Image (cartoon, helix red, strand yellow):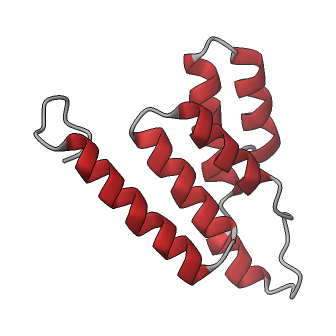
Amino acid sequence: MACQKFQYGRNASIMQAFLFLYQYEGLRGKCQETDYNMGRSYHQIGLVNFASHYYHKVLNYPMVEENNNEKFWDKNNLHREAAFNLSLIYRASGNNQVARDLLQKYCTL
């Protein structure tokens, strides 16, 4: 609803959504999942400078979890998703080389 162009109360809806997200972040704690969700939320409403900040935070998490539970980590690792979304931001701004580098580093098998 908050992404529609002419919705009544759009700002109030966005504020309420981010209030919920910050409460979620407080309950869940700082982790890759919460940073990705915050970045995705900012990306959805068009605040790409905030989105890229959170996507970079996701990419700064280690590629392998400390307890070495690879089965869990493979399914819950958000590096690829964050790198892809960040590449979309870079591509939209005309920085195709950085977008390509991100995809090669994080999204290539």
User: 11 or 1, which is in the foreground?
Assistant: 11
Q: Is residue 11 above or below residue 77?
A: above
User: 13 or 59, which is in the foreground?
Assistant: 13
Quarter of the image where one finds residue 46? top left
Viewed as shown, does residue 60 lie left or right of 24? right
User: Residue 55: where, in percent of width, then height?
Assistant: 66, 47
User: Residue 91: where, in percent of width, then height?
Assistant: 61, 20
Q: Residue placed at 19% from the left, 29% from the top?
A: 5
User: 83 or 43, which is in the foreground?
Assistant: 43
Q: In this figure, what is the number of numbered marks?
A: 0
User: Residue 4: where, in percent of width, then height?
Assistant: 19, 36
Q: Is residue 54 above or below residue 75?
A: above
Q: Residue placed at 49% from the left, 34% from the top?
A: 47
Outermost residue on the top side: it is 94
Q: Residue placed at 50% from the left, 66% from the top?
A: 22
Q: Residue placed at 69% from the left, 71% from the top?
A: 31
User: 37 or 19, which is in the foreground?
Assistant: 19
User: Residue 78: where, in percent of width, then height?
Assistant: 65, 60
Quarter of the image where one finds residue 89? top right
Viewed as shown, does residue 37 lie left or right of 4? right
